Amino acid sequence: MSKIQKKIWTVSAIMLVIMSSIWIALTYYNNKTLNQYNEILQRYLSLNEVSTASQEVINNVNDFMLNPTPHNMEQIEKGKKAVLQAKEQVFHLRNVDNNFTITNYSNLIDSFIESTNRFLLYYAENEVEAKAKEFAEASSISNHIADMTLSLMEKELKTYDLFYVGMIKQSNELKELGIWIILLIAFVLLILSYWFSRSITKPVLELTEAANELSKGRFDLQVKVETNDEIAFLAKTFDHMRKNINKLFIETQQKARLEHELQQNKILLQESQFRSLQSQINPHFLFNTLNAISKKAYLEGAQETSDLLVNVAGLLRYNLKQMDRKVPLGDEVEVLKQYLEIQQARMTDRLHVQMEIEASCLTIPIPTLTLQPLIENAVVHGIEPKEDGGNIWVRIRDDVEWVTIEIEDDGVGVPQEIIEKIVTGNYTSQEEQSTGIGCRNVMTRLRLYYGRDDVFQMESVVDCYTKVVLKLWKEKGEGHDAAPNRG
């Protein structure tokens, strides 16, 4: 059975339950009213039975007087039993309102039976006067019973008058209830019909819209239908087809782009080969040239210019070292100072540097070019964008098993999402840095060098500060001769 068929059967079952509930409720209220009516009618019949039975006994006695046969005697005894049975039924009609009257009524019936019995006794003894007197007494009591029966029935009518009014009111209310139930059923039917039709038409409309978008070339829109029937399966199949088409389309675009890039690279390669032939400058020649310019500036009395050129030459010479070497932390600190002197000369009073370095830490070996890229990031991306400049703090302290290096600036800060990408190794900056080594590269090299991930930490608050913390393990650092380069 399909899920759409299940929905149809579910709606049908709900309607069957609603109709059955209404039928049961109406039947219950109808039986309840009928039982109450029968109970009242039975009370009237019980009262009338006493009067009828007593009158029947008088008639039987009269027949016996005219024709004293055993059959007539038997009829008198049957009549007496009928009166006593009727008395027991009347006794059950006792309530708070008619308790006194029912008691008198019962006593009157007992008197009638006793008078009838005395009549039969006197008749057997052939006492004509006495039996005539008892017959007259029994007839009189029978008349009183008839009168009291009418009186009790009148009281019963008054007592149950409110009940009759209630029955009429209940009938009217039941009629109104029936109308409201019909309206409610109609409303529920409308809701169920709307829900059922929407559960089928909405997924079809969504699938139609997705097909229209796909026909317009919108292969990136996911086809998703929130149902649990065959239409959802059709939507999943349709979405799978969309993904295949989109994948094929992307592959075609990538191939076209790669062909274009390959053509561009060929052109650039030809240009670079031409420029390479025009100027092949050896970095060592540039370093020697800077030294020569520095000495000439010194001889001409330009001391600051000479110092600046010496720092640039020293920084260039240090950068010419192989990346897979390890150097003492002290060498990294010296290069760091040279780089900061160059930046302070460029930025003047916009850059302030504070260093707190423990001398006992300077002998630990670390990979070359570890600190300078971090300081460069702090200057270029942290302090320089601020109009008033800022401060950089460099702290190096000995923590027994490792050396902690903190580089902090009060610059513009780094967004948290970029920090997460840097720490996870997923960040690629669009800006080329002067050394060709970014913060991510330093982190990767340190993790490879020490064989653990806790060597690099970074935290920042935008427009407040940025702090990079390096944890350089002494034991691990001493056990490696080379730092691999993956940058």
Image (tube, rainbow, N blue to C red):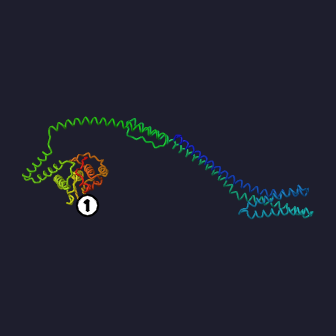
Where residue 190 appears, x then y in whole percent?
54, 44
- Residue at 49%, 39% in the rendered image: 230
Residue 201 relative to residue 306: left or right: right
Q: Which residue is mark 1?
A: 400
The residue positioned 60% from the left and 46% from the top of the image is: 19
Above/below status of 331 relative to 133: above
Note whether 447 is above or below 263 in the view shown: below
Q: Amino acid at mark 1?
A: Val
Can residue 386 be seen in this snapshot? no
Query: Relative to residue 214, is residue 273 drawn left or right?
Result: left
- Dot 1 lies on which element? loop
- Find residue 57 and report its image quarter: bottom right
Q: Residue 125 location, x and y as percent?
A: 92, 63
Where residue 16 appears, as percent x and y from the top left, is 59, 45
**In this rendering, is residue 382 above or below 207?**
below
Q: Dot 1, crowdedness within 10 Å: few (<14), some or many (≥20)?
A: few
The answer to whether residue 233 of the structure is visible from this angle is yes
Q: Residue furthest left?
A: 299
